Image (cartoon, coloured by chain):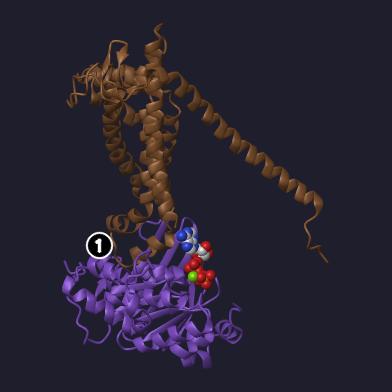
Chain colours: A brown, B purple
Amino acid sequence: MRRLRVGLSRRLKSGLWRGVSVTAAMAMIALLGLIFWTVIKGSLPAWSWSVLTTPTQGLAGGLENAIVGTLWLGLLTMLGVAIAGIATGIYAAVYAPLWARESILFISDVLSGVPSIVFGYVGYLAFVVAFGWGFSALAAALTLTMLSLPYMVRNTYQSFAKVPIHLIDSARALGFSRARTIWSLMWPSSWGGMAAGSILALSVAMGETAPLIYTAEWSQNLPSWDLTHHSVAYLTYVVWTFIQEPYPQANALAYMAGLVLMLVIGAVSFGARVREFGRAR
Amino acid sequence: MNQVLELDPYVGETPAVGLRIEEISVRVGKHMVLEGVSMDLPGGKISALVGPSGSGKSSLLRVLNRLWDGIPRARVEGAVWYQGVNLYGRGVDVAAVRSRIGMVFQRPTPFPKSIVQNISLPLAVHGYPRSEIADRVQASLKTVGLWDEVANRLGTSALALSGGQQQRLCIARALAIQPDILLMDEPASALDPKSRGRIDDLILSLRDAVTVLLVTHHLEEAERVSDRLGVLMDGRLQAFGPTQELFRSAPEKVAQYLRHGSGN
Ligand SMILES: Nc1ncnc2c1ncn2[C@@H]1O[C@H](COP(=O)(O)OP(=O)(O)OP(=O)(O)O)[C@@H](O)[C@H]1O
Ligand SMILES: [Mg+2]
């Protein structure tokens, strides 16, 4: 007869695994804490509420233009990514013949491995120069869209492919068209995955620097809401350039920009989590 | 033009329409799934289809409402005649075919929606006027004996129903759009004996109103409910005829199968 009590070695082993995984989780939290600590400490000299309400002036001033610019670019990008990514993902999951589906997924995997600066350069050559839009919100948002599209395509594809085949079969057997099946049955259960995909794409986009330097340039002013021919400010620019300046107040502003960016991205992901959590119950 | 199946309003009083299956073969790649199957499903009668696992029973049902369409490497040859129209002829409206020839699967497949929506959605898809939908939902739930059980929770998720209830909901969903023919693929095999009995009774109650083709593993079930019996082996129809006659006398191979059953 098998012993009912778990043997000592089994208990030791499971205790060990537990220990390892708890340690790893703690290490991750500690790392996040360290990052926050560094950023907060660095940004303290620049802290005042007016940082949020004044634009940058030279190497000083506040971050209003950059914050609004980042949100503006993020919004445009999310729009582009959602439309293009969902359409491509649905095509791959539902309509595409096998070879087309595999090609889309392959290309999307390759794209997600391309360095972002390459996207910046391509975006510069295509949108800024060839299309003649100049440094602009549209050029930047389209570049960010290309860059974060793979995440959206993957997520959409996977959440649509997860819909059980017997459900689709019974919809077909009832005479549902494909469009109807997608809209009434697949869309509702894929919604969570698509939302997660666009939020991931949004955070990736907002955290980028290199492609924006090529396409949005930089501006001391609030975004003009013109889609073309007006450069746009964004937080990562401040992080990237101001940190290299020899002036302490510029460095502090760079840290502050990093902190704000982390908080914005954190808030967005947290919002998505809360939704997921609500769904799970 | 006569090849196009038109969606006339359903006339409930006309005798149920049958189906003629003519030399149907199905190939998936090089694999022959069905070979030269011909049979007449008489209108308003219950025909049962039995045969060993893998003999092609489900595959034949999938032929009849064109579920093989769009399956990579699958080819269907032959003809299926319904009201003078070959369902595999040119210009046939597949959605219309499927609205006239319904299907119930082995596992209950309710949509992850409310009980009402499971039935109202197909009704809406097929253009039933809004004002009729509530009545039709109620009528079809009554037909399958589910109304009393769910009347006070129509808005709750269909996934919360028991397996037997889910399957009856799926039958109600198929019946709501008033098909002439109902294909049932082992509809009771995933259920407990009591729910199984209810499904059998339900099938019997459809006689005359609907033409039924029932796939089953249970020979006793086939014997109890069916007027006609077909025996499929290795993709070929070995026998097809009045159920009682077949059980009395059949070709040796078939008789052996009918005596000993498939064992599952
Ligand atoms: N989509 C498909 N692609 C390739 N082969 C298939 C496909 N569907 C069925 N087949 C093949 O067709 C044959 C018949 O299968 P089918 O499901 O029709 O049998 P069945 O009589 O319904 O069996 P069971 O009693 O186990 O349900 C099997 O050999 C199966 O492998
Ligand atoms: Mg089967």
Quadrant where the N terminus of chain A is found in the figure? bottom right
Classify residue A222 as left or right of residue A118: left
Residue labelled with disc 1: B90
Percent x, y of residue A19: 68, 41
Q: In the picture, which quadrant includes the C terminus of chain A?
A: bottom left
Residue depicted at 37% across the width and 12% down the height: A250
Chain to which the residue tagged by mark 1 belongs: B
Q: Is residue B254 visible?
A: yes
The part of the image, by quadrant, that contains residue B258 is bottom right
Kind of residue at badge 1: Arg
- Of residues A155 and A44, the one drawn nearer to the viewer in this rendering: A44
Q: Residue at x 33, y 78 (%)?
A: B152
Most foreground residue, B163 or A63 = A63
- Corner quadrant of residue A170: bottom left
Residue A104 shows in this picture: no
The relative height of residue A130 versus residue A86 in the rendered view (above or below) is above
Place of residue B147 in the rendered image (x, y in percent of width and height, measured from the top left):
34, 82
**Given the current orientation, which residue lies at the most extreme top position?**
A246
Q: Is residue A139 above or below residue B7?
A: above
Asked if residue A271 is positioned above or below residue B251 in the image, the reply reads: above
Please tell me whether mark 1 sits on a helix, a strand or a loop.
loop
Residue at the farthest right position:
A1
Q: Residues within 10 Å of mark 1 (few under 14, many from 20)?
A: few
Query: Could you say which is closer to the camera, residue A169 or residue A43?
Result: A43
